[in-house]
Amino acid sequence: MNFASDNWAGAHPSIAAGLSAHAGGFSTAYGDGALDEAAYQRFNEIFEREVAVFFVATGTAANSLSLTAYNKSGGISFCHRESHVIEDECGAPEYFTGGSRLHAVDGALGKIDPNDLDRAVGRFAPEIVHSGRPMAVSITQSTEVGTIYTLNEIARISAIAKHHKLPLHMDGARFANALVALETTPAQMTWKGGVDILSFGATKNGCWCAEAIVLFDLDRARELAFLRKRAAQLFSKSRFIAAQFEAYFKDHLWLDTARHANAMAARLAALIEDSPSARLAWLPQANEVFAVMKKAKAERVHLAGAAFYDWHKPHDFDGHIGEDEALYRFVTSFATTAEEVDRFGELIAG
């Protein structure tokens, strides 16, 4: 019963087989091999246009380099108050940019409020040197609390960013989970809605280690290539990242694994909703479920073998959490089984 994180899941067997299939022989290094080129072309097909693709090791590197691609002296990037980029990356974006800042913006359930964003950006006049100047806007899809920006919400935030002449970055660590939940296309969820640069995550969805920056603003591709190298994110044997993406995209595996993870989250949410000892904090939309549970019950379930984390209460959360209760996060993955979900349901049923 492992609901700690989709990062805890191993590699999908098809991904492992893809790595093994390309383990032997020789291939041009540093992203210039035939397998790399084939992966880049596959990204073009998926996004329905030419894109620039940069493999990196982690989501933190993808997010940090994406913002660095638009770096300015005194730059300020705007993101949700509880986004991963501001809460969980140890200042990496500021480090990579050499001192730019992240400015927190409010919004319900992990999503930036467009009006708050407009006001926040408007506080910083680009011509005034004292306070710094706006540099970028970053959204997370799906969010850190398991919610999803609709296409209209993305377009509205993009319109505000463009009004202020700012690029829009999407942190897509759980990109596939959001995509299948919205039943849309990668193009519709990104560049057609105004996204300029994307952190495309695959590690959480069945890969061993496969993250990519997808750049729709091709004029910045050459500069980003140098930034990636200086950040020590250029793989020599990048064919092993390409091999993962080859298997990931083959026969729509990436969409199937995301649908399974989302379905397991919905199954888990239904059991929590029926439990007398737990309740949903809000409705899940992807593969993360948040619930309020008695602390004593949570401890007993932990001892019975369930892995999950207690979670900080979101800034805007207005639900009641009693003194003997806490908020907990449960994450499902491609490897989650219905049996382990149902076993957890039995433990919280009494």
Image (spheres, rainbow, N blue to C red):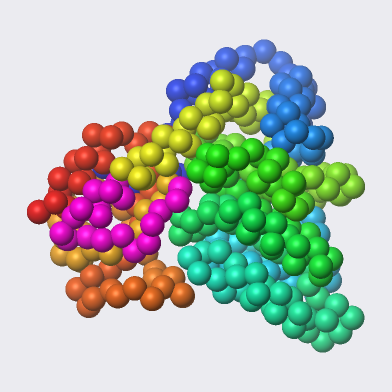
Residue 31 lies in what quarter of the image? top right
Residue 179 lies in what quarter of the image? top right
x, y percent for residue 321:
28, 74
Residue drawn at (76%, 79%) of the image: 122
Left of 200 or right of it: where is 5? Answer: left
Residue drawn at (20%, 66%) of the image: 295
Q: Is residue 181 visible?
A: yes
x, y percent for residue 344:
21, 45
Residue drawn at (78%, 72%) of the image: 134
Residue at the outermost front position = 152
The magenta segment? 268-286
Answer above or below: position of 112 versus 152. Answer: below
Left of 287 or right of it: where is 130? Answer: right
Left of 31 or right of it: where is 253? Answer: left
Residue closer to the observer: 199 or 268? 268
Residue at the outermost bottom position = 130
How many numbered marks, from 0 up? 0
Figure quadrant of the C terminus: bottom left
